[in-house]
């Protein structure tokens, strides 16, 4: 039996209130992040688990809605995930926090581009609207480093979308807004980055 909207949101929110796993200080060995491994380290590692990351649970829940429906649950899931990001991001964690959340969104966007996913256009339209709101929030609160990560991840998603013939005009617009704000505030490197990413995105359509 399909769970109710209330049940779905309650299940999602119980993970979103858990502490984020932003620290990289952990005894668990990840071979992708360790260039040199000694046998003793592997022996000790048998007793450790990776740190609990609530965003992984949230990602799994939203992916399940993309596989099974309804789309409204997917939309609500993304909305709650991104609202959680805005509640948590601040000047102390803006890079790591933004990266964690947008990595989740990026994985969702990749699934949304699959040929057998029936709601690709709906999903991308919704993401674009959310990205526009987020960009305005980051600008309003002068979260410069968060903007840098945001620019990079959103530009990658937009380029993937453009290659699937999805619109990117709203992404180009928000990149332009960030460029204008950054230049006015003296963040010239960020402004140039936004300008370059907007230009690169425009050339995808050429």
Image (cartoon, helix red, strand yellow):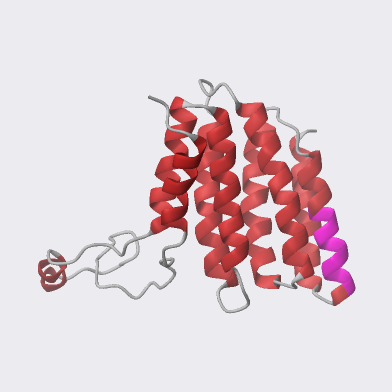
Residue 61 sits in quarter: top left
Q: Quadrant of the C terminus?
A: top right
The rendered magenta stretch, by its main secondary structure, is classed as helix
Q: Is 77 within the magenta?
A: no
Q: Please state the extent of the stretch shown in magenta in the rendering.
A: 175-184
Q: Pick the residue in front: 9 or 98.
A: 9
Image position of 70 with respect to 35: above or below = above
Q: Is residue 203 visible?
A: yes
Left or right of 98 on screen, residue 141: right
Left or right of 134 on screen, residue 174: right
Q: Pick the residue in front: 74 or 152.
A: 74
Residue 27 sits in quarter: bottom left
> For the point 79% across and 68% down, which residue is it?
140
x%, y% of residue 199? Answer: 80, 49
> For the point 63% across and 77% down, which residue is it?
91
Q: Is 178 within the magenta?
A: yes
Left or right of 162 on screen, residue 101: left
> For the point 45% across and 48% down, which residue is it?
10
Q: Is residue 113 visible?
A: no
x%, y% of residue 126? Answer: 68, 38
> For the point 80% across and 52% down, which residue is it?
174
Q: Quadrant of the N terminus?
A: top left
């Amino acid at each position: 039996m399909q769970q109710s909207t209330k049940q779905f949101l309650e299940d999602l929110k119980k993970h979103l209130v858990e502490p984020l796993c932003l620290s990289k200080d952990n005894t668990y060995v990840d071979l992708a992040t360790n260039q040199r491994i000694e046998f003793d380290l592997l022996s000790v590692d048998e007793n450790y688990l990776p740190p609990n990351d609530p965003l992984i649970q949230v990602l799994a829940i939203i992916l399940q809605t993309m596989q099974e429906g309804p789309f409204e649950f997917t939309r609500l899931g993304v909305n709650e995930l991104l609202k959680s990001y805005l509640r948590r991001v601040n000047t102390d964690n803006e890079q790591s926090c933004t990266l964690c959340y947008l990595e989740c969104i990026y994985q969702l966007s990749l699934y949304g581009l699959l040929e057998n996913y029936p709601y690709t256009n709906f999903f991308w339209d919704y993401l674009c609207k959310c990205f526009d709101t987020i960009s305005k929030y980051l600008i309003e609160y002068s979260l410069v480093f968060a903007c840098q990560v945001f620019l990079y991840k959103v530009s990658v998603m937009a380029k993937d979308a453009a290659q699937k013939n999805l619109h990117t005009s709203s992404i180009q617009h928000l990149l332009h807004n960030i460029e204008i704000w950054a230049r006015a505030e003296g963040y010239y490197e960020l402004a140039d980055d936004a300008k370059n990413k907007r230009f690169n995105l425009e050339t995808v359509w050429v």
